């Protein structure tokens, strides 16, 4: 993820991360992406069941019971292993995680074992009682997915009334004192809604928003043709930067991030280079600490059935199952050659990625997106919108 507000607006300095020794166990949450050890943030898709029918769902979630989900006791053992391994953040996702009756119990167990517990949810099931429960167990953050204003959001979510219920969930979280933020997946049909999302941040006093670039996985695989073109992506990122800067100038403390396209980092740096070269140098240092895409290294995924993936979008390639082998061993003693390669992916990327001047700050971007389009996991990411001139090493003409 690229912290637009942190980088562009100067709310984080390189010295902030260095002060903590860049160790995951010591860094506060807002600096975790700059860790040196890259202990993985783990997404645990606790269920495949969901009460909505989102067109871009990477999990192919459905509103039906599945009989292969990890039990509560298996979940406790997974958390024990991850806590001992030093996983700093456990993100409960789905499907819709709040459909699981034991979700509060599992999240509380993670908190008790020293991890930051966060939830990615559609927000429609967060009534006042649930919001108070999540606050009481020590949940760090609730990310609620909204893909536009009411009509647009409900079209993407596949259920009428989803927007209003999500807004109610946001308000219930705020009332209970839980930090809450928005998750917005950008595509051709809702890019025009970005200004409305910024307006919503102000109107509902929401402190954080993540703008996700589309990843071609799950039902999202059907939307490749509906992704933004490269010029459209550049315009969307510029708009996000401009609106973030406007919030900062007006003294409104909002955290704004873009996710799932690490070309955003060099793009932001190049823009700053022409506006504020001194700040640009600091941003480049922070981007190098961030190290770009970390699938298979700084981020991992455990599915509802115990399968372990490089991230939540890699469901076609499992590295093992925690029912047979602990997550920590799968992660640190990879038997699958792909997992070993992903931990040093800069050695394996091909084409323009291999010679890109930004390889150290991007790490080749999203391999799963390259594979979805080309069939080659090491091919250039088709969503990289930087021009050949922008990525050419400075020593070349």
Image (cartoon, rainbow, N blue to C red):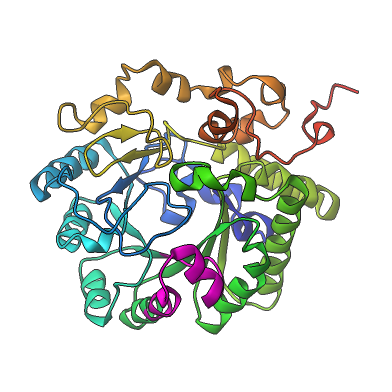
Q: Check the image and name the residue furthest to the right.
A: 397
The residue that appears at 15% across and 27% down in the rendered structure is 324
Position of residue 334 relative to residue 197, above or below, is: above
**Image quadrant assignment for residue 298:** top left
Q: How many callouts does the rendering have? A: 0
Asked whether 146 falls inside the magenta stretch, the response is yes
Q: What x and y, as percent, mark residue 149?
A: 56, 75
Position of residue 151 relative to residue 116, above or below, is: below
Position of residue 27 relative to residue 183, above or below, is: above
Q: Nearer the viewer, residue 211 or 88?
A: 211
The residue that appears at 44% across and 64% down in the rendered structure is 157
Residue 62 located left or right of residue 188: left
Q: What x and y, as percent, mark residue 284?
A: 68, 42
Q: Nearer the viewer, residue 14 or 119?
A: 119
Q: What x and y, as percent, mark residue 7?
A: 64, 54
Q: Is residue 18 visible?
A: no
Image quadrant holding the C terminus, namely top right
Residue 134 located left or right of residue 24: left
The overriding secondary structure of the stretch rendered in magenta is helix
**Image quadrant assignment for residue 285:** top right
Bounds of the magenta segment: 144-168
Q: What x and y, as percent, mark residue 334?
A: 32, 20
Position of residue 53 relative to residue 177, above or below, is: above
The residue that appears at 54% across and 28% down in the rendered structure is 371
Q: Is residue 238 visible?
A: yes
Asked whether 42 falls inside the magenta stretch, the response is no
């Amino acid at each position: 993820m690229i912290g637009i507000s942190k980088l562009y607006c100067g709310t984080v300095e390189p010295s902030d991360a260095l002060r903590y020794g860049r160790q995951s166990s010591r860094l506060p949450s807002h600096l975790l992406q700059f860790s040196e050890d890259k202990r993985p943030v783990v997404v645990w898709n606790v269920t495949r069941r969901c009460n909505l029918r989102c067109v871009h769902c990477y999990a192919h979630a459905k509103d039906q019971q599945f009989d292969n989900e990890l039990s509560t006791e298996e979940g406790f053992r997974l958390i024990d292993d991850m806590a001992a391994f030093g996983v700093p953040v456990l993100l409960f996702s789905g499907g819709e995680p709040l459909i699981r009756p034991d979700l509060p119990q599992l999240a509380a167990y993670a908190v008790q074992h020293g991890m930051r517990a966060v939830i990615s949810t559609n927000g429609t099931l967060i009534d006042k009682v649930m919001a108070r429960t999540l606050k009481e167990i020590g949940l760090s953050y609730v990310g609620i997915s909204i893909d536009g204003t009411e009509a647009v959001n409900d079209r993407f979510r596949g259920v009428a009334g989803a927007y209003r219920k999500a807004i109610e969930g946001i308000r219930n979280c705020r009332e209970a004192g839980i930090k809450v933020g928005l998750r917005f997946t950008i595509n051709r049909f809702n890019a025009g809604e970005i200004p409305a999302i910024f307006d919503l941040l102000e109107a509902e006093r929401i402190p954080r928003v993540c703008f996700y670039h589309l990843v071609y996985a799950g039902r999202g695989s059907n939307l490749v043709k509906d992704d933004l073109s490269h010029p459209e992506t550049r315009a969307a990122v510029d708009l996000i930067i401009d609106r973030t800067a406007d919030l900062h100038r007006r003294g409104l403390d909002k955290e704004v991030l873009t996710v799932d396209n690490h070309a955003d980092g060099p793009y932001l740096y190049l823009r700053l280079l022409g506006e504020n070269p001194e700040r640009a140098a600091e941003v480049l240092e922070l981007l190098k600490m961030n190290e770009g895409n970390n699938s298979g290294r700084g981020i991992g995924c455990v599915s509802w059935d115990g399968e372990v993936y490089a991230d939540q979008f890699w469901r076609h390639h499992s590295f093992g199952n925690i029912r047979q082998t602990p997550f920590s061993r799968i992660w640190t003693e990879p038997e699958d050659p792909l997992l070993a390669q992903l931990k040093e992916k800069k050695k394996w990327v091909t084409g323009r990625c291999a010679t890109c001047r930004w390889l150290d700050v991007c790490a080749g971007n999203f391999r799963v997106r390259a594979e979805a389009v080309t069939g080659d996991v090491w091919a250039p990411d088709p969503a990289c919108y930087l021009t050949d001139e922008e990525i050419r090493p400075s020593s070349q003409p």
